[in-house]
Image: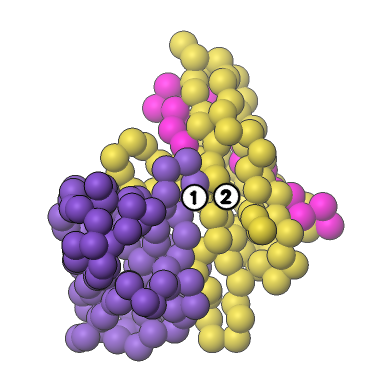
Amino acid sequence: DQQVKQNSPSLSVQEGRISILNCDYTNSMFDYFLWYKKYPAEGPTFLISISSIKDKNEDGRFTVFLNKSAKHLSLHIVPSQPGDSAVYFCAASADSGGGADGLTFGKGTHLIIQP
Amino acid sequence: EAGVAQSPRYKIIEKRQSVAFWCNPISGHATLYWYQQILGQGPKLLIQFQNNGVVDDSQLPKDRFSAERLKGVDSTLKIQPAKLEDSAVYLCASSLGLGSYEQYFGPGTRLTVT
Protein backbone atom coordinates (compact mmCIF):
# COMPACT_ATOMS: atom_id res chain seq x y z
CA ASP A 1 0.00 0.00 0.00
CA GLN A 2 1.62 3.21 -1.20
CA GLN A 3 1.31 5.93 1.40
CA VAL A 4 2.90 8.62 -0.80
CA LYS A 5 1.84 8.78 -4.43
CA GLN A 6 3.26 10.69 -7.36
CA ASN A 7 0.91 9.83 -10.19
CA SER A 8 2.87 11.47 -13.01
CA PRO A 9 5.96 9.44 -13.91
CA SER A 10 7.14 12.25 -16.18
CA LEU A 11 6.45 15.89 -16.99
CA SER A 12 7.76 18.01 -19.84
CA VAL A 13 7.82 21.82 -19.47
CA GLN A 14 9.19 24.57 -21.65
CA GLU A 15 12.11 26.61 -20.29
CA GLY A 16 10.90 29.77 -18.54
CA ARG A 17 7.44 28.36 -17.79
CA ILE A 18 6.08 27.08 -14.49
CA SER A 19 6.62 23.43 -13.51
CA ILE A 20 4.04 21.94 -11.14
CA LEU A 21 4.74 18.56 -9.56
CA ASN A 22 2.01 16.87 -7.53
CA CYS A 23 1.99 14.46 -4.62
CA ASP A 24 -0.79 12.78 -2.63
CA TYR A 25 -0.57 10.96 0.68
CA THR A 26 -2.85 8.68 2.64
CA ASN A 27 -1.35 8.55 6.15
CA SER A 28 -2.90 11.19 8.41
CA MET A 29 0.01 10.84 10.83
CA PHE A 30 2.44 12.49 8.42
CA ASP A 31 3.31 15.93 9.76
CA TYR A 32 6.27 16.97 7.63
CA PHE A 33 6.78 16.87 3.89
CA LEU A 34 9.91 17.22 1.80
CA TRP A 35 10.90 17.41 -1.84
CA TYR A 36 14.15 15.92 -3.10
CA LYS A 37 15.81 16.30 -6.48
CA LYS A 38 17.88 13.50 -7.97
CA TYR A 39 20.30 13.47 -10.87
CA PRO A 40 21.47 10.15 -12.40
CA ALA A 41 24.17 8.33 -10.40
CA GLU A 42 23.82 10.77 -7.49
CA GLY A 43 21.96 10.60 -4.20
CA PRO A 44 18.78 12.63 -3.63
CA THR A 45 19.39 16.29 -2.76
CA PHE A 46 17.12 18.07 -0.29
CA LEU A 47 15.21 20.87 -2.01
CA ILE A 48 12.45 22.28 0.19
CA SER A 49 10.16 21.18 3.01
CA ILE A 50 6.94 22.14 4.74
CA SER A 51 5.45 21.45 8.15
CA SER A 52 1.82 20.39 8.42
CA ILE A 53 1.05 23.56 10.38
CA LYS A 54 1.75 25.64 7.27
CA ASP A 55 0.13 25.72 3.85
CA LYS A 56 2.96 27.33 1.89
CA ASN A 57 6.72 27.57 1.98
CA GLU A 58 8.83 29.49 -0.52
CA ASP A 59 12.55 29.39 -1.28
CA GLY A 60 13.67 31.33 -4.32
CA ARG A 61 12.18 29.76 -7.45
CA PHE A 62 10.67 26.89 -5.45
CA THR A 63 7.36 26.96 -3.59
CA VAL A 64 5.64 24.05 -1.89
CA PHE A 65 1.90 24.16 -1.20
CA LEU A 66 0.15 21.84 1.26
CA ASN A 67 -3.59 21.10 1.33
CA LYS A 68 -4.11 18.98 4.43
CA SER A 69 -7.81 18.40 3.93
CA ALA A 70 -7.12 16.95 0.47
CA LYS A 71 -3.91 15.23 1.60
CA HIS A 72 -2.18 16.84 -1.35
CA LEU A 73 0.97 18.84 -1.86
CA SER A 74 2.57 20.40 -4.89
CA LEU A 75 5.95 21.83 -5.84
CA HIS A 76 6.04 24.87 -8.11
CA ILE A 77 9.21 25.88 -9.94
CA VAL A 78 9.14 29.33 -11.53
CA PRO A 79 10.75 29.99 -13.93
CA SER A 80 11.88 26.52 -15.00
CA GLN A 81 15.52 26.23 -16.08
CA PRO A 82 17.39 23.49 -17.99
CA GLY A 83 19.27 22.51 -14.80
CA ASP A 84 15.94 21.65 -13.20
CA SER A 85 15.70 18.54 -15.38
CA ALA A 86 15.89 15.69 -12.85
CA VAL A 87 13.73 13.19 -10.97
CA TYR A 88 11.78 14.81 -8.12
CA PHE A 89 10.74 12.77 -5.10
CA CYS A 90 8.03 13.69 -2.65
CA ALA A 91 8.67 12.37 0.86
CA ALA A 92 6.80 12.44 4.16
CA SER A 93 7.60 11.83 7.79
CA ALA A 94 5.90 11.65 11.14
CA ASP A 95 6.95 12.04 14.73
CA SER A 96 5.82 8.80 16.32
CA GLY A 97 6.87 9.97 19.76
CA GLY A 98 10.56 9.25 19.55
CA GLY A 99 11.42 12.02 17.11
CA ALA A 100 11.36 12.21 13.32
CA ASP A 101 10.73 8.86 11.65
CA GLY A 102 12.46 7.72 8.49
CA LEU A 103 11.08 9.15 5.25
CA THR A 104 8.37 7.53 3.12
CA PHE A 105 8.96 8.35 -0.54
CA GLY A 106 6.82 8.46 -3.66
CA LYS A 107 8.03 6.84 -6.88
CA GLY A 108 9.23 10.12 -8.33
CA THR A 109 8.41 12.35 -11.29
CA HIS A 110 10.94 12.85 -14.08
CA LEU A 111 10.87 16.55 -14.99
CA ILE A 112 12.20 17.44 -18.42
CA ILE A 113 12.76 21.11 -19.25
CA GLN A 114 12.58 21.71 -22.98
CA PRO A 115 14.68 24.58 -24.42
CA GLU B 1 31.25 20.90 4.87
CA ALA B 2 31.82 17.35 3.65
CA GLY B 3 28.72 15.40 2.67
CA VAL B 4 27.74 11.82 3.39
CA ALA B 5 30.39 9.42 2.08
CA GLN B 6 29.64 5.91 0.86
CA SER B 7 31.76 3.11 -0.53
CA PRO B 8 31.99 1.24 -2.77
CA ARG B 9 30.04 3.10 -5.47
CA TYR B 10 29.39 -0.08 -7.46
CA LYS B 11 29.44 -3.79 -6.62
CA ILE B 12 28.63 -6.88 -8.63
CA ILE B 13 28.28 -10.22 -6.86
CA GLU B 14 26.74 -13.62 -7.51
CA LYS B 15 23.67 -14.77 -5.62
CA ARG B 16 24.39 -16.43 -2.28
CA GLN B 17 27.56 -14.34 -1.84
CA SER B 18 27.91 -11.73 0.88
CA VAL B 19 28.52 -7.99 0.52
CA ALA B 20 29.11 -5.02 2.83
CA PHE B 21 28.56 -1.31 2.33
CA TRP B 22 30.12 1.50 4.33
CA CYS B 23 28.77 4.94 5.21
CA ASN B 24 30.31 7.96 6.93
CA PRO B 25 27.67 10.60 7.80
CA ILE B 26 28.04 14.36 7.94
CA SER B 27 30.12 15.34 10.97
CA GLY B 28 27.95 15.97 14.01
CA HIS B 29 24.89 14.19 12.63
CA ALA B 30 23.51 11.88 15.30
CA THR B 31 20.89 10.08 13.18
CA LEU B 32 21.83 7.74 10.34
CA TYR B 33 19.56 5.92 7.89
CA TRP B 34 19.96 3.18 5.31
CA TYR B 35 17.54 3.08 2.37
CA GLN B 36 17.09 0.62 -0.49
CA GLN B 37 16.07 2.03 -3.88
CA ILE B 38 14.94 -0.48 -6.47
CA LEU B 39 14.85 0.72 -10.08
CA GLY B 40 11.71 2.77 -10.79
CA GLN B 41 10.82 3.11 -7.10
CA GLY B 42 11.43 5.67 -4.40
CA PRO B 43 13.90 4.91 -1.60
CA LYS B 44 12.58 2.57 1.11
CA LEU B 45 13.81 2.84 4.70
CA LEU B 46 15.70 -0.22 5.96
CA ILE B 47 17.05 0.94 9.31
CA GLN B 48 17.41 4.11 11.41
CA PHE B 49 20.11 4.68 14.06
CA GLN B 50 20.27 7.35 16.73
CA ASN B 51 23.94 7.51 17.74
CA ASN B 52 24.81 3.81 18.03
CA GLY B 53 21.31 2.59 18.95
CA VAL B 54 18.65 1.24 16.56
CA VAL B 55 15.50 3.37 16.42
CA ASP B 56 13.61 1.51 13.68
CA ASP B 57 14.53 -1.70 11.84
CA SER B 58 10.99 -2.89 11.14
CA GLN B 59 11.58 -3.04 7.35
CA LEU B 60 15.00 -4.70 7.49
CA PRO B 61 14.94 -8.34 6.26
CA LYS B 62 16.77 -9.58 9.30
CA ASP B 63 17.29 -13.11 7.98
CA ARG B 64 19.86 -11.77 5.52
CA PHE B 65 20.49 -8.08 6.24
CA SER B 66 22.38 -6.67 9.21
CA ALA B 67 23.65 -3.21 10.08
CA GLU B 68 25.75 -1.69 12.79
CA ARG B 69 26.97 1.71 13.94
CA LEU B 70 29.35 0.73 16.70
CA LYS B 71 30.89 4.07 17.70
CA GLY B 72 27.94 6.25 16.74
CA VAL B 73 29.67 7.61 13.66
CA ASP B 74 30.15 5.47 10.56
CA SER B 75 27.99 2.47 9.73
CA THR B 76 28.11 -0.81 7.82
CA LEU B 77 25.24 -2.60 6.07
CA LYS B 78 25.73 -6.26 5.22
CA ILE B 79 23.79 -8.71 3.08
CA GLN B 80 24.44 -12.43 3.54
CA PRO B 81 23.48 -14.36 1.45
CA ALA B 82 22.44 -12.07 -1.40
CA LYS B 83 19.44 -12.79 -3.62
CA LEU B 84 18.69 -11.55 -7.13
CA GLU B 85 15.97 -9.23 -5.75
CA ASP B 86 18.58 -7.40 -3.64
CA SER B 87 19.83 -5.67 -6.79
CA ALA B 88 19.26 -1.99 -5.98
CA VAL B 89 20.96 1.23 -4.96
CA TYR B 90 21.69 1.39 -1.24
CA LEU B 91 21.55 4.93 0.07
CA CYS B 92 22.86 6.22 3.36
CA ALA B 93 21.48 9.44 4.83
CA SER B 94 22.09 11.43 7.99
CA SER B 95 20.37 14.17 9.96
CA LEU B 96 21.27 16.32 12.94
CA GLY B 97 19.08 14.37 15.33
CA LEU B 98 15.65 12.95 15.98
CA GLY B 99 14.15 16.44 16.06
CA SER B 100 15.33 17.17 12.53
CA TYR B 101 13.31 15.98 9.54
CA GLU B 102 15.73 17.01 6.79
CA GLN B 103 17.97 14.15 5.75
CA TYR B 104 21.08 14.45 3.61
CA PHE B 105 21.96 11.59 1.30
CA GLY B 106 25.18 10.08 0.09
CA PRO B 107 25.75 9.07 -3.57
CA GLY B 108 24.68 5.48 -2.96
CA THR B 109 26.11 2.04 -3.75
CA ARG B 110 24.70 0.31 -6.82
CA LEU B 111 24.53 -3.45 -6.15
CA THR B 112 24.00 -5.94 -8.95
CA VAL B 113 23.36 -9.56 -7.98
CA THR B 114 23.77 -12.05 -10.83
Give neighbour class at mark 1: few <14, some 14-19, many 20+ (Cα, 10 Å): many
The residue lying furthest to the top in this view is A115
Nearer to us in this view, B40 or A27 = B40
Q: Which residue is mark 1?
A: B42
Tag 2 secondary structure: loop
Q: Which residue is mark 2?
A: A106
Tell me: residue A5, above or below residue A52: above
Nearer to us in this view, B77 or A84 = B77
Q: Position of residue A19 (x, y in %)?
A: 60, 28
Q: Colour of chain A?
A: yellow
The residue lying furthest to the front in this view is B16
Nearer to us in this view, B80 or B48 = B80
Please say if the residues under marks 2 and 1 sit with CB atoms less than 8 Å apart.
yes
Q: Which chain is purple?
A: B
Q: Chain of mark 1?
A: B
Task: Specify whether residue B60 is in view.
Answer: yes
Query: Which quadrant of the view contains residue B104?
Result: bottom left
Q: CA distance from mark 2 to mark 1?
A: 5 Å
Task: Specify whether residue B95 is in view.
Answer: no
Tag 1 secondary structure: loop
On whether residue B36 falls in the magenta region, the answer is no
On whether residue A86 falls in the magenta region, the answer is yes
Nearer to us in this view, A60 or B108 = B108
Q: Chain of mark 2?
A: A
B11 vs B102, left or right, is left
Q: Which residues fall within the magenta stretch?
A: A69-87
